């Protein structure tokens, strides 16, 4: 799943699209009410509208920061929001890994929100349960401004490998092997939990 500069050098054998991302936050102190964050609920506005809400309350919340994992779809989304004037530049931060995201939000200083893929949010949550047992972050859901393609990625200039990926994907989908079908069923369930709409795994 990707969005941003790397996508221009990649082609994707698409399996579906991601339609939501996660906002990870600590319930105390609670994030500003204007941001409309509720545990396990979908925000009423899409991500760009939500970033504009941050900009609108920036003078009243000087400590509020939004962090993402470096070189991910969510990170490129934040960069897009800054270029479009939806998010103030001084509100964005990035961290290189799951444990650094967990450490950053556990300090909650400044008031921190992590924007990331749903799967990354659950990994951060699990890491914090292990390392910071007294801190339990919540996950809210935020609609993407446009669907993000999900699938098997390969270099755009490597059409041979792309054709191999496409053939392997079709073989899996069309397989009558019970183990393969069981794996596809697990993939569907996982995709549902991660906010991914599959188009090729029936």
Image: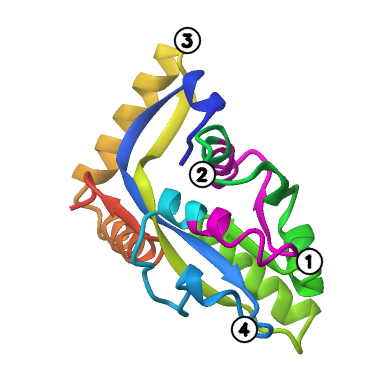
Residue receiving disc 4: 27
Residue 99 point in image, percent of width and height: 77, 62
- Please tell me whether mark 1 or mark 4 is closer to you in this view: 1
Residue receiving disc 1: 110
Residue receiving disc 2: 86
**Helix, strand or loop for disc 4:** loop
Q: Around disc 4, counting alpha carbons within 10 Å, would you say few (fewer than 14), some (14 to 19), or many (20 or more)?
A: some
Q: Residue at x 53, y 38 (%)?
A: 85
Q: Residue at x 38, y 75 (%)?
A: 41
- Please tell me whether mark 3 or mark 1 is closer to you in this view: 1
Q: Around disc 1, counting alpha carbons within 10 Å, would you say few (fewer than 14), some (14 to 19), or many (20 or more)?
A: some
Q: Around disc 3, counting alpha carbons within 10 Å, would you say few (fewer than 14), some (14 to 19), or many (20 or more)?
A: few
Q: Residue at x 52, y 60 (%)?
A: 119
Find out whether the residues at labels 3 and 4 contact each other: C-beta distance under 8 Å: no
Q: Is residue 127 left or right of residue 198?
A: right
- Please tell me whether mark 3 or mark 2 is closer to you in this view: 2
Residue receiving disc 3: 157
Residue 93 point in image, percent of width and height: 72, 49
**Alpha carbon distance from label 3 to label 1:** 43 Å
Q: Is residue 132 above or below residue 110?
A: below
**Alpha carbon distance from label 3 to label 4:** 46 Å
On whether residue 72 falls in the magenta region, the answer is: yes
Residue 68 point in image, percent of width and height: 64, 51
Q: Is residue 70 left or right of residue 79?
A: right
The first of marks 3 and 2 along the sequence is: 2
Q: Quadrant of residue 24?
A: bottom right
Q: Nearer the viewer, residue 179 or 105?
A: 105
Q: Is residue 16 left or right of residue 64?
A: left
């Amino acid at each position: 799943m990707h969005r941003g500069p790397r996508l221009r050098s990649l082609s994707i054998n698409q399996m579906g699209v991601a339609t939501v991302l996660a906002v990870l936050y600590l319930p105390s102190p609670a994030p500003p009410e204007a941001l409309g964050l509720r545990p396990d609920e979908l925000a009423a506005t899409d991500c760009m509208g939500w970033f504009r809400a941050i900009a609108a309350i920036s003078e009243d919340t000087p400590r509020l920061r939004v962090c993402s994992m470096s070189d991910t779809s969510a990170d490129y989304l934040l960069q897009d929001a800054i270029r479009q004037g939806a998010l103030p530049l001084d509100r964005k931060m990035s961290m290189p890994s799951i444990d650094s995201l967990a450490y950053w939000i556990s300090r909650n200083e400044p008031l921190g929100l992590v924007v990331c893929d749903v799967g990354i949010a659950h990994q951060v949550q699990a890491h914090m349960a292990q390392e910071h047992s007294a801190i339990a972050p919540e996950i809210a859901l935020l609609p993407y401004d446009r669907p993000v393609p999900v699938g098997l990625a390969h270099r755009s200039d490597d059409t041979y490998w792309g054709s191999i990926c496409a053939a392997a994907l079709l073989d899996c989908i069309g397989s009558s092997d019970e183990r393969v079908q069981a794996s596809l069923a697990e993939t569907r369930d996982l995709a549902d939990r991660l906010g991914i709409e599959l188009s090729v795994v029936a």
